[in-house]
Amino acid sequence: MWVCPGRAKRRPPMTPPDRLKAAWLNAPANRAVMNALDAARPGGSRYVGGCVRNTLRGLPSDDFDVATQLTPPDVIAALKAAGVRAVPTGIEHGTVTAVFESQPVEITTLRRDVETDGRRAVVAFTEDWAEDASRRDFRLNAIYAGPDGVLHEVIPGSIDDAHAGRVIFIGDADQRLREDYLRILRFYRFNAWYGAGIDAEGQDACARQREGLRRIAAERIWKELKRTLAAPDPAPAMEAMDEAGVLAEVLPGASISLLPALVAAETSAGLTADPMRRLMAMVPRRLREAGELAARLKLSNEESGRLASWAAPALPHVLGAGDAAMAEAFYRHGPAAVVDRAAIEAAEGAAGDLAALASRAAVWQRPKFPVGGADALAAGLEGPGIGTALAALEEDWIGSGFTLDRRTLVSKLNTFN
């Protein structure tokens, strides 16, 4: 793990025009919302968070957050006056979602924390940009931009952090974490995507506060982990998480030893970064433990099924297998499970062409077993004997490489009488 050697120095005073240049500033929904808010309070609303940060880093933005000095009732009134739909999505925390031509823009009144418990906060509204900025998590997330793109650096060093990809807590890191322990995982997630080296003070604070994650709902923990593991190369951030003892809190028994090799194998084979596959590489490949993990993280049915398919004892080694064995594995277990298994085998050092296997899996179409219950009834079979006969015939069909035709299979039904 590479640790950032020191905090960034303060950025010299900005010289106009220090502003964002982005097409989204003139997008219809953004213009409609900002015009409505500006009509109610000129200069009182600014973009903040991911859209500003990503634009500074040359990345696309499709999620827009606005901070405003208007109170929620005034926001709703201003939007309605301009013909923009207003949805009070988090009114107790000052959040109203504006919807214009089906595009949402989240608007939140400037606020300060009155009380926090590590999961939720009681807030009070303010008109002070510095108060609002100081309650945010990282400096690179506390940069404001006016409707014209002019940048407002309230927290010294924040614009430099965004340019460089430094993830540094605002103020006292331990205090920021005690306000919301989920910020521990956000620290590693942002480092996975933007990190220019783990900030030593942030790393130490996460280690000290890691037990606070026990108070966070499993769904929120998995959401953050999944977003972290979806980064192009999450291995350095996951290594830092492991060293801080955070990984043991959220994934007991997990190991990151295979993760760098898996990332390399995925990249070499042209596979998309896949958080579920990367999770598989970190946990034991045992069906019972896979089920326990799915329950603990409250994975979706699709995610749980995929984890179970990968962990199934019957799933054979596939990397380097012949065409017939590969086709049989696709049929019995599904191409996704086969690719997952093969990618992890490649990370373990097994020989074989992962790219070729993945390409074949992408175009594979499941063959249809050509006989069914009606054929068995016509052959005079009945009761449990129908299922037994069809299962045996399907095994013969699979063993032939799916070449036995319907006529041959139907004729074999007579042997079960």
Image (spheres, rainbow, N blue to C red):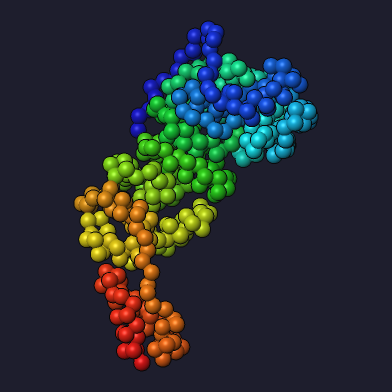
Single out the residue that lies furthest toward the front.
407
Asked if 60 appears above or below 181 in the picture, the reply is above
Residue 340 in the image: x percent, y percent?
35, 53
- At a point 34% along the width and 62% down the height, the residue shown is 330
User: Which image quarter: residue 27?
Assistant: top right
Of 67 and 413, nearer the camera is 413
Residue 169 in the image: x percent, y percent?
52, 26
Residue 394 in the image: x percent, y percent?
34, 76
- At a point 37% along the width and 63% down the height, the residue shown is 366
Residue 154 in the image: x percent, y percent?
59, 17
- At a point 32% along the width and 43% down the height, the residue shown is 270
Any part of residue 254 in sight:
no
The answer to whether 124 appears left or right of 373 in the picture is right
Any part of residue 19 in sight:
yes
* Quadrant in which the N terminus is drawn: top left
Of 158 and 264, nearer the camera is 264
